[in-house]
Structure formats: structure tokens, C-alpha cells
Image (cartoon, grey):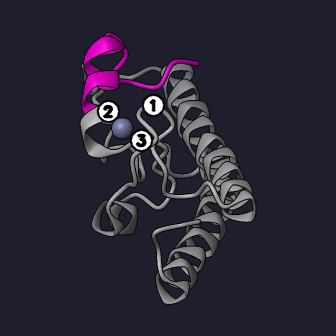
Amino acid sequence: MSHLTPAQLQALTQMLDQRATAAQAEIRAQAGQRADEPYADLSGGVNDPGDDATADQIVDLDNAMIGMELSELRDIAAARERMKNGRYGVCIDCQQEIDFERLGAYPTAKRCARCQGLHERTFASAPHPTL
Ligand SMILES: [Zn+2]
């Protein structure tokens, strides 16, 4: 059984719903706005090595952001699936329970903080999303 209370699970379910809605809205916005405001919203989270990005690079960044949102939607779907199976909130690496505090910050978390740290060091070569 899950170590989370029904109220905690409900709160996390709502967070997943909100994230899914936001991700879908972001995808629509990105797909619709690239012609008029190519630089909008690109400064957050994406380290562009220069200000002289070509149109191609801007399109690549848009695609990367859409890709991030799509992978977020996949993570959310997977988290909902784990909730259904009663495996939500259990680390996929060490099978330990993931703290509610961590799930509150990352409702799609598949690993506990310790295993996530190990995982990120192991796969540290890709800080940016790859296309
Ligand atoms: Zn773990």
C-alpha cells in the first residue's frame, strides 16, 4: 500500500492535473506564437550561448520546449498509472518510499532524492534536452 494518505494523494493528483493543463497550454502557445515573438519565454531555463540566434535555432528551441512539455505529459501519464497500480511514491531504483515533501515539489518523481542524485551523476552529460 501507499505510504501517502488519501488527502495527500488527492493533493498530488490535483497537482498532476494542473501540470498537465499547463503543459498542454504551453504547447499550444509555443506552436502558435513563434512567428511574432520568437524570444518570448525563451530566457527561462534554456542556456543559449549567444544572443544572435538564427531563426533555425529559435525553431529548435521552440521544438525543445515543446519536447520538454511533451515529456512532462508522458511523466504525468506514467505517474497517474503508478497511482492506479498503487506504486506511486515508491522509488523505482531502491523501492523506498519517496517523501511527500519531494512529491509535492516533483509530483512526477520516480526516484527518491538519493537515487535521483545518483542517477543524475551517472547521466550528467545531458543538462539540456536533446532533440
Ligand atoms: Zn531510491
Q: Position of residue 20 (x, y in %)?
A: 64, 64
Q: Residue furthest bottom?
A: 7
Label 1 CB, ligand 1: below 8 Å?
yes
* Spatial separation of the CA atoms under disc 2 and disc 3: 6 Å
Residue pictured at 39% horizontal, 46% vertical? 96
Residue pictured at 39% horizontal, 62% vertical? 103
Contact? badges 1 and 3 (CB < 8 Å)? yes
Contact? badges 2 and 3 (CB < 8 Å)? yes
The one nearer the camera, 122 or 35, is: 122
The disc label shown at residue 93, or none: 1
Label 3 CB, ligand 1: below 8 Å?
yes
Magenta segment: does it hold 113? no
Q: How many C-alpha atoms fall within 10 Å of the one at disc 2: few (<14), some, or many (≥20)?
A: some
Q: Position of residue 49 (x, y in %)?
A: 25, 19
Residue bearing mark 2: 115
Q: Is residue 38 left or right of residue 128?
A: right
Q: Which residues are magenta?
A: 117-131
On-image quarter of the N terminus? bottom right
Residue pictured at 24% horizontal, 37% vertical? 114
Q: Amino acid at mark 2?
A: Cys
Instruction: Of the two numbered discs 2 and 1 on the same chain, state the one appearing first in sequence.
Output: 1
Residue pictured at 57% horizontal, 84% vertical? 10
